[in-house]
Amino acid sequence: MLLVLAAALGSIMVSYTRARGEALGVDVKIGTMQRPERVFYLGLALVMAPLLRDSGALVLGMRIVPIVLAWLAISANWTAIARIRHTMKRLVCVA
């Protein structure tokens, strides 16, 4: 459950930091985990999990979704932090 919450928080923060930065007049199109990437990775994992279970790769099929969720949690939160730092740096240079 904590993994899902961390991934959800990261996803929300990526979008929020971009919107907030742009509202402050800073172009915040940095980072690797924007919405299309998050949807692609999670969708691919959800499609592949049953296929891997049926093909005999039971261990990978059962663990692919938590692995991808962990990747999303780490990379989305990393992107949000990078966007916050970028925005702060830009605002300090302007002031």
Image (tube, rainbow, N blue to C red):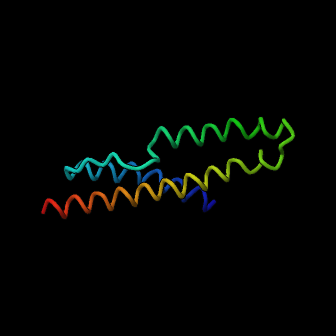
- Image point (84%, 45%), residue name: 58
In the picture provided, is 32 more to the left or to the right than 47?
left
In the image: residue 16, left or right of residue 56: left
Q: Residue at x 39, y 48 (%)?
A: 15
Looking at the picture, does residue 2 appear above or below residue 65? Answer: below
Residue occupying the point 38% across, 58% down = 82
Q: How many marks?
A: 0
Residue 54 point in image, percent of width and height: 84, 36
46 vs 18, left or right, is right
**Which of 31/11 is in front?**
31
Position of residue 18 relative to residue 3, above or below, is above
**Outermost residue to the left:** 95
The quadrant of the rendering that contains the C terminus is bottom left
The image quarter in which residue 84 lies: bottom left
- Which residue reaches farthest right? 56
Q: Residue 76, how many percent across, how many down?
A: 48, 53
Question: Which of the 4 image quarters holds residue 7?
Answer: bottom right
Task: Classify 95 as above or below 43.
Answer: below
Image quarter in which the N terminus is found: bottom right
The quadrant holding residue 41 is top right
Tell whether 30 sits left or right of 48: left
Q: Residue at x 47, y 50 (%)?
A: 11
Residue 16: percent from the left, percent from the top?
36, 51
